[in-house]
Amino acid sequence: MHKLKSATSLLLPRRVLLTRPCAKSSELAQWLSVKGIFSVSHPLVEAHSLENITNLLSICDADFVIAISENAVRFSRHKIKAWPQNCHYLAVGGATQTQFKALGITADIPNYPTSEGLLKLPCLSQVKDKNVTIIRGHGGREFLGETLTQRGANVSYLEVYDRKLVEMNVQDCERQWQQHQINTIVVTSGEILQHIYTNVGENSLSWLRGLWLVVPSDRIAIMAKKLGANNVSISHGADNESILKILLN
């Protein structure tokens, strides 16, 4: 899916709402400020470490270890005492790869930072009887694991964090966003997107659907169009560098 932007949206100075977790929103806000772009941070999801980790030992026998987010590595680094040496590490994207690198681990990444991108890697095409450990948050997408299972892999999940949506005071949010003349929203997950559309009042839906929406993947872009979003761009990555590149276009 390609960019879908109205001619009017291209003419307006960017005034950006950042909805991703606090640390990432703050970093992106600083970069935007340097570029002279106005932004407001309103994190709508936060990640928290899980204390009780099941399947922790599954990583010991893994042929492949796949981390599907930065948080997957960040929240597991103090849980896993010894990372296996003789396995193939994969990261969903560059930011996750960097987290692995900080641990002295080299991880391969796909061309497109999604589960679909990972599944196109040649190393995952023949995984019959291979042990695959997927490090993720609680209740993550099943698509990657299910597809690898269909290919004959023995898939284990290592869930190391939980995501919690931040409650929205709908009237305050709508008033503040419109007072700030927001015309662009950065949304980095399907659950954040659904959270916004579920909670915004009926009277503000037409305003919301007219904003320029920046999302990280085709899958979330399709969700946005189904919810009625008119102007959608895909950054092809949830990292701040990819998002900034789109916002500066």
Image: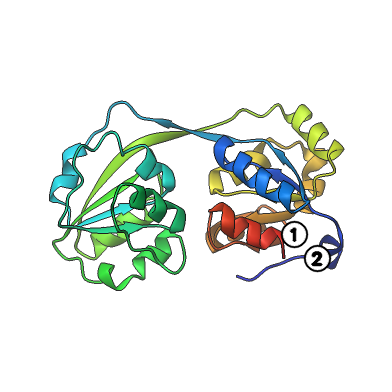
Closer-to-camera residue (229/5): 5
Return the x and y of residue 188 as percentages of the image width and height: 57, 49
- Say whether residue 115 is left or right of residue 246: left
Quadrant in the picture for residue 177: top right
Return the x and y of residue 178 as percentages of the image width and height: 84, 39
Return the x and y of residue 185 as percentages of the image width and height: 70, 49
Foreground label between 1 and 2: 2
Q: Earlier in the sequence, mark 1 or mark 2?
A: 2
- The reply to whether dot 1 and dot 2 touch (C-beta < 8 Å) is yes
Residue under label 1, please give it. Answer: 230
- Type of residue at label 1? Asn
Residue under label 2, please give it. Answer: 6
- Type of residue at label 2? Ser
Question: Helix, strand, or loop for circle 1?
Answer: loop
Mark carried by residue 85: none
* Mark 2 crowd level (few <14, some 14–19, many ≥20, 10 Å Cα): some
Q: Residue at x 27, y 45 (%)?
A: 157
Q: Residue at x 25, y 63 (%)?
A: 150
- Say whether residue 60 is left or right of residue 241: left
Q: Residue at x 20, y 66 (%)?
A: 127
Return the x and y of residue 78 as percentages of the image width and height: 29, 34
Quadrant placement of the C terminus: bottom right
Q: Residue at x 66, y 56 (%)?
A: 214
